[in-house]
Amino acid sequence: MIVLFTDFGTRDPYVGQVKARLAVEAPGVAVIDLLHEVPDFNAHAGAHLLAALVGGFPPGAVFLAVVDPGVGTPRGTVVMQAGGRWYVGPDNGLLSVVAARAPDARLWRITWRPDELSATFHGRDLFAPIVAALARGEFPRERLAMVDAPGVEFDAGDLPRIIYIDHYGNAWIGVRGEPRVARVSAAGTVFAYGTCFGAVEKGQRLWFVNSVGLIELAVNRGSAAATYGLRVGDRVDVERVN
C-alpha cells in the first residue's frame, strides 16, 4: 500500500503525474490519497498532521509525504522506517515528529539521482521511484546512505496552534486531547467541551477530541473558521487540569 500525503491540492495535475509514475514502477499496488490539502508550504503543520494520521495504516504501508517549498535547493531528503511503516520525503521537518515519537525509527538520505530530475518536482522524479521500490518489497540500498537523525527536527511535543481546517470549517489543533482538559480558547473565545457535534445546540461552538486524537474546534452545523476568523497557525490556549 502506498499512501500519498501532500500539499498538491486536487485541481492541478501534480497528483495525477505522481500516480502515473507509481503505476509504472509499482503496478498493482494500491495507492491511497490520504490528504492533498496539507496547508501550503507548511511542513510544521504537516508534521503534526502526519503523526496524528499514520495510526490508521497497517505495517508495510509506504508514505510519500511531500510539502516541499525548498524543492530544488540543497535541502536534504529522508527515507524512514518507523513503527513498521515506510516514509519518503524532504528533510525539512515534515517527517521529524513521526521520527521522534517512534522508538524504532531508522533513517537514510537519498544519494541517487535519476537521469531526468525536474528541479521543481522531486515528488514525481526522485521520491516516487524510491516509494515504488519499497512498495514492491525491495530496499534500494545502493540509492541510500544511513543517517542518525533528520537534518531538520521540530519539537515532537504538542503544538497549541491550528494545523488544519477542513471544508466544514472545523479547526484541528496540534494537541493530543482528552476530556480532562479544563479550558480551550481561540480568537478570544472559550469553546465548551462536548463529546460530538450534537452535544451542543445548532450554531453553538464546542471543542472535542476528534477521530485521530487531536483537539478540534467546531460549530454544530456551522463553520468555526468563518464564525471566529480562525486560520492555520493561530494559537489556541489549552489549559489542563493538574
Image (tube, helix red, strand yellow):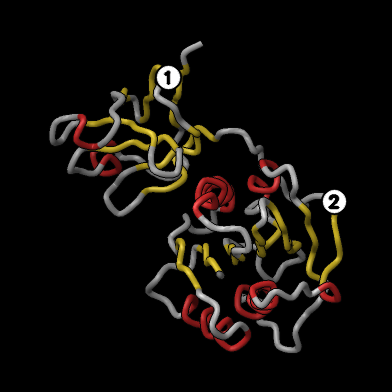
Q: Which residue in the structure is indicated by mark 1?
A: 180
Q: Amino acid at mark 2?
A: Asp
Residue pictured at 14% horizontal, 31% vertical:
201
Q: Residues within 10 Å of mark 1 (few under 14, many from 20)?
A: few
Query: In which image quadrant can residue 147 be found?
Result: bottom right
Label placed on residue 106: none
195 relative to 142 in the view: left or right: left
Q: Nearer the viewer, mark 1 or mark 2?
A: 1
173 relative to 129 in the view: left or right: left
Q: Is residue 156 above or below residue 110?
A: above
Residue positioned most to the top: 242
Q: Is residue 128 above or below residue 172?
A: below
Residue pictured at 52% horizontal, 85% vertical:
20
Q: Amino acid at mark 1?
A: Arg
Query: In which image quadrant can residue 60 be found?
Result: bottom right
Residues 59 and 242: in front is 59
Secondary structure beneath dot 2 equals loop
Q: Residues within 10 Å of mark 2 (few under 14, many from 20)?
A: few
Residues 178 and 120: in front is 178
**In x, y percent, where is residue 139?**
77, 72
**In x, y percent, where is residue 242?**
51, 10
Q: Which residue in the structure is indicated by mark 2?
A: 148
Residue pictured at 45% horizontal, 38% vertical:
214
**In x, y percent, where is residue 17?**
52, 82
**In x, y percent, where is residue 160?**
50, 32
